[in-house]
Image: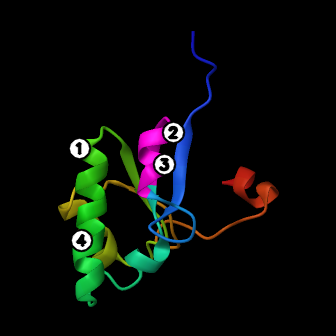
């Protein structure tokens, strides 16, 4: 019987986020760090890194979330590479809960 706890690996590719965690933890989601998304349309490294993270995650059966999506171009590039879940100002800015509930 499961405990109902699920793991998402945030800020993947930076800091303490290691490939070893993909083997040791029951990770279900990978969140691509905004530092890779920000320049994806004009930085060759990011153009290669992001699709690689997406493909690796899909191959391992994990969902992928891209954070820091601020332009339609970024979203379109991510979608063309198989990432369909996003966070960022393109979709809305942070709000106090009271303002959120009004909408």
Classify 71 as above or below 54. below
Question: Where are the magenta residues, as a range?
Answer: 19-30
Q: Which residue is mark 3?
A: 21
Question: Is 13 left, or right, of 98 in this rendering?
Answer: left
Nearer-N-terminus badge (3/4): 3
Taking the spot 37% from the left edge, 44% from the top edge, the residue there is 63
Classify 40 as above or below 83. below
Q: Given contact means CB atoms under 8 Å apart, are the residues at marks 3 and 2 in contact?
A: yes
Which of pointers 4 and 2 indicates the residue nearer the eye? 2
Q: Which mark is residue 59?
A: 1
Q: Is residue 49 magenta?
A: no
Which of pointers 1 and 3 indicates the residue nearer the eye? 3
Question: CA–CA distance between discs 4 and 2?
Answer: 29 Å
Identify the element where label 2 is drawn.
loop
Nearer-N-terminus badge (1/2): 2
The quadrant the N terminus occupies is top right
Question: CA–CA distance between discs 1 and 2?
Answer: 16 Å
Q: Which mark is residue 25?
A: 2
Question: CA–CA distance between discs 1 and 4?
Answer: 19 Å
């Amino acid at each position: 019987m499961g405990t109902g706890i699920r793991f998402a690996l945030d800020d993947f590719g930076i800091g303490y986020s290691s490939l070893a965690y993909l083997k040791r933890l029951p990770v279900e989601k990978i969140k691509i760090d905004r530092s890779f998304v920000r320049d994806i349309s004009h930085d060759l490294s990011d153009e290669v890194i992001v699709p690689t993270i997406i493909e690796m995650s899909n191959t391992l059966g994990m969902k992928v979330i891209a954070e820091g999506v601020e332009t339609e171009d970024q979203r379109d590039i991510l979608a063309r590479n198989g990432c369909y879940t996003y966070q960022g100002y393109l979709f809305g800015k942070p709000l106090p809960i009271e303002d959120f509930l009004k909408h």
